[in-house]
Amino acid sequence: MMTSPTPPHRALPPWIAAQAQQLLVQRGHAWLLHGPSGLGQYGLAMELARAWVCEAPSASGACGVCGRCHAIDVRTHADVCVLMPETYMLELAWPLPEKAQSEIDEKKRKPSKEIRVEAMRDAVEFSQRTSARGRGKVVLIFPAERMNGVTANALLKTLEEPAGDVKFVLASESAHELLPTIRSRCLGHPMLWPAAHDSVLWMQTQGIAPAQAHLLLKAAGGRAEDALAFAASGRDAASWAALPKAVACGDVGCFKDWTVPQIIDALHKLCHDLMACRYGASPRFFDHVDTLSTASIDVLSQWSQSLAKARRTMDHPFNAGLMQEALVSQAQTALN
């Protein structure tokens, strides 16, 4: 799941800062940060890159105020190369290569959802050049699982035998999808899952009230950054708490202004919780859904399969309103 970009000077969550300090004292040239979405892989990768090229780094990381830190904040540092799908690059305000931007502007093609092999070849060439500012170079790849086989193979030799003072940081939300040869060439770092109490305290520093923070954190499955992204999307905790009963009544209005992917994600979570209750487990995303429906495991399994099928086609240019009605109708039928 994609999260909103971290503002340049926003304080890092304490668990990300602690992991950055831990990694900065290690020696090596390639790291793989891995774990489920919403645990801060991108933020941690950026903090490492910033510290590696900072003019005055300390034991706690980059200074945050020097010219090189500022250059990263405004996406212009000559010794930092960021590789992402073009859709991510645009969302996170990283500039695209001139040719790629021109092709997209002229409607010759849509932004790529994979890391293109042309971009990887440019990154390999970048890694072989001399550092522009004398502090070495950094290649950041996120999400690393968006490299296809050709793109990953273009990286392999350079990852094994880098030329000069270059560091690689690969951040992944599905590391099992990476080639084994890529994983074996990196120092692995599993992302830490923060305690709920720490997440709520940090969300309060970001302007979220404690009661809302608890509900949003539950909606995001315990992932603080996803919880903040939920709030930033315009949705609120109260609407999330009311969602199960509204869906059971067929109330399409509960998803007003939601995107189709957001609706499918919410319904998948509701289905998950109902199935968990059937097996005697506690719900993860919602409170008090155990009495919502008496649907059997077979019915819930069929609903889950239908949602999985809808997820595969959710980016197709369907009529969003009709898709919304169909999803709610399907959910109401399953719940009743």
Image (spheres, grey):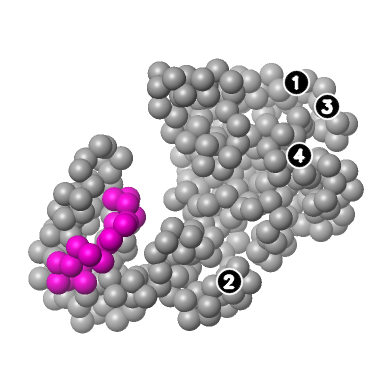
Q: Earlier in the sequence, mark 2 or mark 3?
A: 3
Residue 157 lies in the magenta stretch: no
Residue 76 rendering spot, x and y as whole percentages: 72, 34
Which element carries disc 2, helix, strand or loop?
loop
- The amino acid type found where label 3 is placed reads Ala
Q: Which mark is residue 14?
A: none
For the residue pair 66 and 122, the one nearer the viewer reads as 66
Provide the residue designation for mark 3.
132
Which corner quadrant of the image does residue 186 belong to?
top right
Provide the residue designation for mark 2.
207
Q: Which mark is residue 71?
A: 4
Q: Nearer the viewer, mark 2 or mark 3?
A: 2
For the point 51% across and 20% down, which residue is it? 102
Q: Earlier in the sequence, mark 4 or mark 1?
A: 4
Residue 288 rendering spot, x and y as whole percentages: 29, 81
Provide the residue designation for mark 1.
128
Q: Earlier in the sequence, mark 1 or mark 2?
A: 1
Q: Nearer the viewer, mark 3 or mark 4?
A: 4
Crowd around label 3: few <14 · some 14–19 · many ≥20 (10 Å): few
Mark 2–mark 3 distance (CA, rounded to whole Å): 39 Å
Which element carries disc 1, helix, strand or loop?
loop
Q: Are marks 3 and 1 in contact (CB under 8 Å)?
A: no
Mark 4–mark 2 distance (CA, rounded to whole Å): 28 Å
For the residue pair 253 and 68, the one nearer the viewer reads as 253
